[in-house]
Image: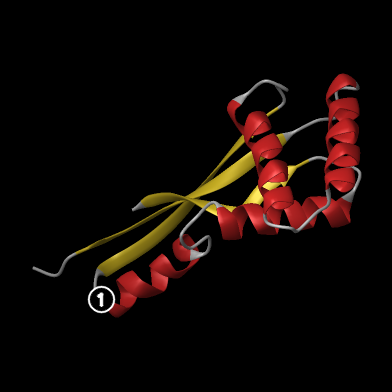
Amino acid sequence: MFDRDTDSLIIAHPDRDTTRRIVASFSDQQSMDGWLERRLLGRLTEAELLDVRVRAFTSIERDASGYFALGALRAAETAVLAGVITEEEHKRWVDALREEQAAGRFIVGLTHLFVWGTRPA
């Protein structure tokens, strides 16, 4: 199984508190279960699969117009809609994000987990 770990959204931003709230909101609002991938190893083990393994893949981008950069903006919009941040916090956060991008200090990414095992013969 391969899926994203939505709580692992990485956003380089100077406002840690607001960014943490945005990431948590993204995880809670954009997935049925943002921690499902974290439980798959245990679930496959409980299902008595053999040689259960997990590997993480983290994609990182610096491009302000890349997939994950646009996702970070959507995550911030989602946080406003969920009432996690205010419109004013959103504006300040996006402005600061654009400053980070312009200064070349911006990274964004997300970790995906690949979990697998073998059925007993």
Q: Is residue 113 above or below residue 117?
A: above
Q: Is residue 39 depicted above or below 7 in this figure? A: below
Residue type pointed to by label 1: Ala
* Residue 37 percent across, percent down from the top left: 46, 60
Q: Position of residue 71 (x, y in %)?
A: 62, 36
Q: Residue at x 91, y 43 (%)?
A: 14
Whether residue 27 sits left or right of residue 64 in the image: it is left
Which of the pair 40/80 is nearer the observer? 80
User: Percent x, y for residue 109?
Assistant: 64, 39
x then y, percent, for residue 99 = 91, 27
Image quadrant in which the C terminus is located: bottom left
| Residue shown at the point (30%, 66%) measured from the top left | 51
Q: Nearer the viewer, residue 110 or 24?
A: 24
- What count of labels does the image hold? 1
Q: Secondary structure at mark 1?
A: loop
Q: Is residue 68 left or right of residue 34?
A: right
- Identify which residue is drawn at 69% across, 38% down: 72
Dot 1 corresponds to which residue?
47
Residue occupying the far bottom of the picture: 46
With 47 as the anchor, is 27 left or right in this view?
Answer: right
The residue at the point 71 percent across, 51 percent down is: 79
